[in-house]
Amino acid sequence: MALLTALILTDDDAFRAQTGDALRSGTVPVTMLDERPAAGVVQPDLILVDGREESQALAAIERARAGAPAVSIFMIARTVTPDLILQSMRAGANEFLTWPPDATFQEAIARAAARRTSLSPARPRATTAAFLGAKGGAGTTTVAVNSAVEIARLSRRPTVIVDLKAGMGEVTLFLGVRGRYTVFDAIENLHRLDVEFLRELVVKHKSGLEILAGSDHFERPASSDSPAVEQILRLLTQQYEHVVIDAGNQLTGSSTAALYLADTIYLVTNPDVPSVRNAQRLLDRIGQLGACADRVRVLLNRASEPYPIPPDQIESALGRPIHHMFRSDYRTVSTALNSGVPLSMTGNTELSAQFDSFTRGMLELPVEAPESGRRGALGLQRLASIW
Ligand SMILES: Nc1ncnc2c1ncn2[C@@H]1O[C@H](COP(=O)(O)OP(=O)(O)OP(=O)(O)O)[C@@H](O)[C@H]1O
Ligand SMILES: [Mg+2]
């Protein structure tokens, strides 16, 4: 799936908000650029021009086209007239749409994504997975870290995990590494954030996985840091083939930025009443935020019999299938955690086999180990997940 970076040209905040929601509610992950060129490292793939003021809009399209011959430009006009369509196309627009956005908007975005892929087929495209916990202690970091190690090991492609949890991120701890820098340093130095600088900020694990450590400032990243977080994540998607995000268990501005950007949002829950209730509420909220609900997959962690709530009841309550289950195995998880060694490196356990099959599914690789973790009472199991 292509990831589009979009820029909205308007003076009207309501237009910006509504167009942003429409952009983000589709199946193509879209990240938004601030109108002010910040670090200057990211160019938009798509420019949306508020065309309700026609002459200004046509001039804006001409300028945008002159500056970026390959960018997709959408003219969003108040009304359709053959003359205005012609003028927009002559100025350099690729699509002519009407305000407010309707179904044709999503079709145009899909065309822009296809165009972007055809124009730069060699440009590596990262797959991005965000892990969000239904509640504190659900095992979000355990699942994100062990999946990231498996992805790096199985794919042998550049893979990074980003710890977005404010103050107490534990990704480096789980991996037994110590980074000098954190997400906080990336946010604070956004003006000079480029590929070289980013390389300085990450720390490498022996599996090959690279880590952008969690901030040690309790209140950061804050909601006001979300544009910076979005920009950092976007840059990571240009440098790595796999980006894994530990988004914590709160819907803050920065975790929401991660959800918008992610190809797949893994909601980590446990088979107990508070976790399932919170998962329901988070699913509702993710839908309201406009992040595409089709990109959410439910993961059931600590899933062992006897279940406080059986998996089929959880699926009914959530109205969606459990994508993958990880058994409860405190001994194995805590031994791995205490030694700072990921599960896949601690031996053959059922849990490590479950991580292996989960990540093989993510990478669309054949599953070698006997599958013990995958199920789906709604009959909606998926071997090759999109993510
Ligand atoms: N499958 C599992 N079986 C048994 N214990 C587990 C499992 N997964 C996680 N745990 C344990 O649960 C605890 C919390 O795990 P973890 O830190 O990954 O959760 P979290 O959701 O990231 O928590 P936080 O909200 O603090 O970020 C840890 O002690 C971990 O060892
Ligand atoms: Mg955690």
Image: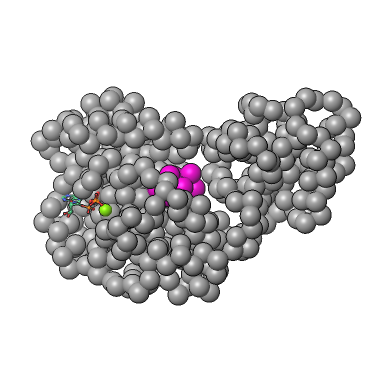
Which colour style is shown?
one colour
Residue at x-position 37% and y-position 39%: 297
Residue at x-position 84% and y-position 32%: 85
Residue at x-position 10% and y-position 35%: 306
| Residue 364 in view, yes or no | no
- Looking at the image, residue 164 lies above or below residue 266: below
Question: In front: 47, or 238?
Answer: 47
Q: Position of residue 191 (x, y in %)?
A: 55, 66
| Residue 180 in view, yes or no | yes
Q: Position of residue 239 (x, y in %)?
A: 52, 64
Question: In front: 336, or 231?
Answer: 231
Q: Position of residue 286 (x, y in %)?
A: 41, 35
Question: In front: 300, or 356?
Answer: 300
Q: Which is the main secondary structure of the residues drawn in magenta?
A: helix
Asked if residue 263 lies in the magenta stretch, the reply is: yes
Residue at x-position 71% and y-position 37%: 50
- Looking at the image, residue 171 lies above or below residue 300: below
Question: Is 64 left or right of 312, judged from the image as shown?
Answer: right
- Looking at the image, residue 209 lies above or below residue 98: below
Residue 220 placement: quadrant = bottom left
Asked if residue 210 lies in the magenta stretch, the reply is: no
Q: Which segment did they paint magenta?
A: 254-264
Q: Position of residue 175 (x, y in %)?
A: 27, 66
Residue 340 placement: quadrant = bottom left
